[in-house]
Amino acid sequence: MHLSYSFIFLLLIIFMLEATITQAQGKSTLVSAIFAFGDSTADPGNNNYIKTPSRSNFSPYGRDFPNHVATGRFTNGMLIYDFIAKHVGVKESVPPYLDQSLSTEELKTGVSFASGGSGFDPLTPKISNVISISKQLENFEKYKEKMEAAIGKEQTQNLIKEALFIVSAGINDFVANYNTLPIRRINYTTSAYTDFLLQHVDRFLQELMDQGARKIAVANLLPMGCLPFVITLNSDIINAITKRDCIDSQSSIAQDYNFKLQNMLNDMQIRFAKLGSRIAYMDIYTPLVDMILGRKYDFEIVNRGCCGTGSVEFAFLCNPISFVCPNASKYVFWDSIHPTEKAYYLVSQALLPTIDSITKY
Ligand SMILES: *[C@@H]1O[C@H](CO)[C@@H](O)[C@H](O)[C@H]1NC(C)=O
Ligand SMILES: *[C@@H]1O[C@H](CO)[C@@H](O)[C@H](O)[C@H]1NC(C)=O
């Protein structure tokens, strides 16, 4: 008798706990879907379906997924926006739009249109033949048509209105384009080029809103001067092989861009508030620089990637015959450009208040 009373009591507690958890989940599910646009920081594998050297659907990419599956994400596991999708309660990870096998159910909770190597400058995606931002928007329009056919026009409109939009690009415009090719440098100073990029960001965001987007989060630039590849390229030989300190002049470019981006987004938020728009500035720079300078978090290696020598390899240079460090969680960077899953996870956690500010109100 005693036993069965405590058993019932236990069941009751479990039942109450479950009810509380379900309720809490119910409250946070104000987001219908997640859509991502941009570059490798948000591309879960769209580049697998196009002809480009900018790919990562081979080992050791994806090494820390179960079965080590190389999805096309440019890291050893998940991206920031996979973790955010999970946080807002829509799905465990965001699939690439170009995967033709996605079910209507999967499409309904969101996809990524991003393409590794892309940027806001229309010239940037041409360098590695990847999907431009304007083409990503066209793909979004096609997505909408597909959904209208599947679930109806009104439902699709609501879906878009309640969805979280993530925009994450800009680093390739500097690293692959402005710093590498002479074309833009002839016409633009760094500061003028920053303004040029931000005009494209502004136009893109307006087009997204024209398409019905209302909750939009835009990532800033990560500390560019601390990317292992940028350190290697911009150092004298001594720094390149010994200390590998960040290149402050390069991080300053990112800081200037970020400052202007934040002001621009604040202005847009004011201008578009009457539409019901919520536009947020996502600061990925600060958590990353905190990791790299050891101000917060506890990484052992901050100036080299886990793959290869860690100083130059990414995409096809980080491949099945590359040396790979045994434990990527000790590294901020997975290859010479892209953070590890561990770093991405910590950045995603730092972003949650920002995400909540535009999704819960
Ligand atoms: C950019 O530079 C080229 C060559 O110097 C020049 O012909 C062109 O007019 C410039 N474009 C702009 C937009 O200033
Ligand atoms: C990898 O490194 C992390 C961070 O130092 C540590 O917490 C974890 O236990 C390590 N994993 C293994 C398998 O050694």
Image (cartoon, rainbow, N blue to C red):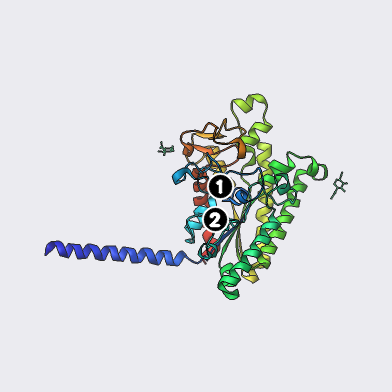
Provide the secondary structure element on which disc 2 rests.
loop
- The answer as to whether callout 1 falls within 8 Å of ligand 2 is no
Instruction: Residue 38 in the image: state x and y as whole percent.
Output: 64, 53
Label 2 sits on what residue type?
A: Pro
Give 85 or 263, whichever is nearer the viewer. Answer: 85
| In this picture, residue 75 sits left or right of residue 115 | left
Q: On the picture, is 100 further left or further right than 69?
A: right
Find residue 187 and report its image quarter: top right
> Which residue is farthest left?
1
Disc marking residue 73: 1
Q: Is residue 19 left or right of residue 327?
A: left
Residue 80 lies, in percent from the top left, at: 53, 50
Q: Quadrant of residue 6?
A: bottom left
Picture layout, residue 142 above or below residue 337: below
Q: Mark 2 highlights which residue?
A: 95
Percent position (x, y) of residue 117?
66, 46
**Residue farthest along the front direction in this orientation:** 101
Q: In front: 137, or 105? A: 105
Hey, which residue is sitting farthest top in the picture? 238
Q: Nearer the viewer, residue 356 or 104?
A: 104
Residue at 68%, 39% in the rendered image: 250
| Mark 2: few/some/many CA within 10 Å (<14, 14-19, 20+) | many
The numbered mark, 2 or 1, whose residue comes first in the sequence reads 1
Q: From this view, report whether residue 159 is shown above or below residue 124.
A: below
Q: Give the residue at x 49% y 45%.
A: 69
In percent of width and height, residue 51 lies at 67, 47
**Hey, what amino acid is under mark 1?**
Arg
Residue at position x 34%, y 67% from top?
A: 19
Distance between the Cα atoms at labels 2 and 1? 10 Å
Residue 252 seen in render: yes
Image quarter of the N terminus: bottom left
